[in-house]
Image: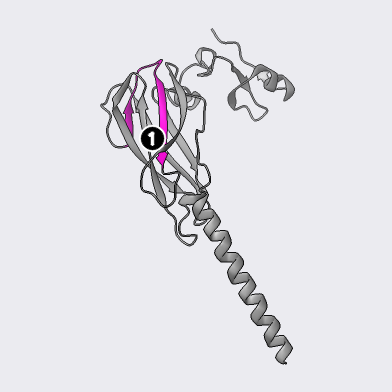
Amino acid sequence: MMKSKLFLFLATSLFAVYSIDAYAQFESERPDAYLEWLRETYSSTDTGVIRVVDAYMNQNPEKIETLTVTIYSEERESEGIIVELIETYESAGIFEGTMFFTTTDTSSGHRLHVIPGDLIIAEYTYSSDPTSNVLDTSVVDEIQITGIPSLKTQLDRGTPINEIQCPNPEHVLAERPNEKTACVKQSTAEKLNWTLIIQI
């Protein structure tokens, strides 16, 4: 019985020491963060989705947390907006948020005024040193605003099928077996045996 208690004490102590050392290492060597737009291009009327992966910002694994990113046009940086991203679940360390593009309204809240052709930058700034509050590191991702609305927007507007344009110039319009349309690379459409739709 005495040996069992001694073994349990040593095992518990070893686990406690290991946990403290691992936590200390994580505290002193902050993992890099990563930011991305979920698409390469958006039209001037689309909804944009931004994702940040930052394990360090999962401060409480039992709570959904938030962080913020700045979004602005390269041509009009002063009109940028701050968007809050929400952790996808309690211990994810992955944060996502949405914002909206507009050509008619001013930038405000989660809405950014854009002009077709704009280069839109999302920027996440953080401290590389866990013991410091100095924000010294930034990660960015860029997307291009096209003048062509998303496929969904064009369909919702009742645009004739042969007049629909794919926002990505590298994509073609194709009809899937379920009779729904999609903008994909021509090689993808051919591989899946989807029917190409001739656009005028």
Q: Which secondary structure class fits the magenta region best?
A: strand
Q: Name the residue carrying label 1.
A: 99
Q: Nearer the viewer, residue 86 or 198?
A: 86
Number of other residues with Cα within 10 Å of mark 1, as a class: few under 14, some 14 to 19, many 20 or more = some
Return the residue nearer the eye: 165 or 104.
Answer: 104
Furthest toward the bottom, the residue is 1
Residue occupying image coordinates x 54% and y 60%: 23
**In terms of depth relative to the viewer, which is nearer, 9 or 155?**
9
Q: Position of residue 179 (x, y in %)?
A: 62, 27
Please identify the quarter of the rendering in which residue 106 is found.
top left
Task: Name the residue at 72% across, 86% down.
Answer: 4
Q: Is residue 152 above or below residue 66?
A: above
Left or right of residue 58: residue 180? right
Q: Position of residue 88 (x, y in %)?
A: 49, 49
Which range is magenta? 110-126
Q: Is residue 156 magenta?
A: no
* Snapshot quadrant of residue 187: top right
* Picture coordinates of residue 172, whole percent (x, y): 60, 16
| Percent of width and height locating residue 133 | 36, 48
The quarter of the image holding the N terminus is bottom right
Q: Residue at x 74, y 22 (%)?
A: 191
> Against 31, is 187 above or below?
above
Question: Could you tell me which residue is drawn at 33 percent across and 29 percent down?
Answer: 112
Residue 84 sits in quarter: top left
Q: Per the image, is 124 magenta?
A: yes
Q: How many marks?
A: 1
Which structural element holds mark 1? Answer: strand
188 relative position to 155: left or right? right
Task: Report the amino acid beneath label 1.
Answer: Met
